[in-house]
Image (cartoon, rainbow, N blue to C red):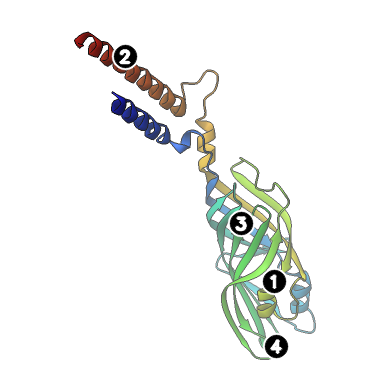
Amino acid sequence: MRRLVTAVVVALMFAVGAVPASATAEPGMCQVENGRLDWGVKKEFRDYIAGPVANGSWLEGGGASFQGGRFRWASASGTLDRTTGTGLVGFIGSVTFSGHAGAVTRTLANPELQFVSPTTVYLLVDVSGVKSDGTKVASPGVQFAALSLPTGALDTTEPTLALVDVPAVLTAQGATVFGGYAAGDALDPVSITITLACSSTAAASASPTASSPMSPGLLTWLVLALGVIAIILVLIGLVFLRRRAS
């Protein structure tokens, strides 16, 4: 009889551990469905390229465009966990700056937002071109700029995440490939608009209300409780039969 009781207790422990985590967890992982990145890079640099000294221009390609003093990269894709503030969101397109009759060029292509915390994001870009000293640059995925998000910027359940004029500064890696500026120099602010499909949204819509059917988690515990009652009744019956047999 003692062994039977022990076996029942162990079985109940496993049953409790088997309750689905989805009954209480609210995952924040989101799939990026679409979006855009608006960024002017650095107005001072644009003025220099288009000014009388460099006497140059810039050219957008791959779907990028220039409007309202900013370059726009679109066709966003990737993932973002709004709970941990981590993820990677990429955009498509390129901008090529050219000055001094083509002696100096710099292409910034396919930017990515590397979310590392709820308040810290790095802007990665593929950088290529020729520096003023003739040195060629070909560096994919450069951690070009550091962005500082305001506290709570990701704390939203709305399907569209809109971050306007996020401050950005040049990183050490960015300074190496950009040229003419030092790490920590201010860049143009970045505006981000991305549409998300989040698992937490689905979990919230499935949560029970006063008039809704019983949730899966509550149903699991109810079935478990009925199982415990059934086992207790069986044990009582076994004890009764054993006493009668003796």
Q: Which residue is mark 3?
A: 36
**Res 223 → quadrant:** top left
Residue drawn at x 52%, y 29% is 207
Crowding near the residue tagged with mark 3, few <14, some 14–19, many ≥20 C-alpha atoms within 10 Å = many
Is residue 118 left or right of 216 when viewed as pictured? right
Query: Which amino acid, mark 3?
Result: Arg
In the image, 178: left or right of 233?
right
Query: Horizontal and vertical percent for residue 16?
Result: 42, 32
| C-alpha gap between disc 1 and disc 4 | 20 Å
* Residue 195 horizontal/vertical position (percent): 57, 48
Q: CA distance from mark 1 to mark 2?
A: 73 Å
Looking at the image, tell me whether mark 2 or mark 3 is earlier in sequence order: 3
Which of these two is toward me, 96 or 86?
86
Please state which of the two labelled residues, at mark 1 or mark 3, is closer to the viewer. 1
Neighbor class of circle 4 (other Cα within 10 Å; few <14, some 14-19, many 20+) is few
* Of the image marks 1 and 2, the number of the one nearer the N terminus: 1
Q: Which residue is mark 1?
A: 171
Residue 132, which numbered label?
A: 4
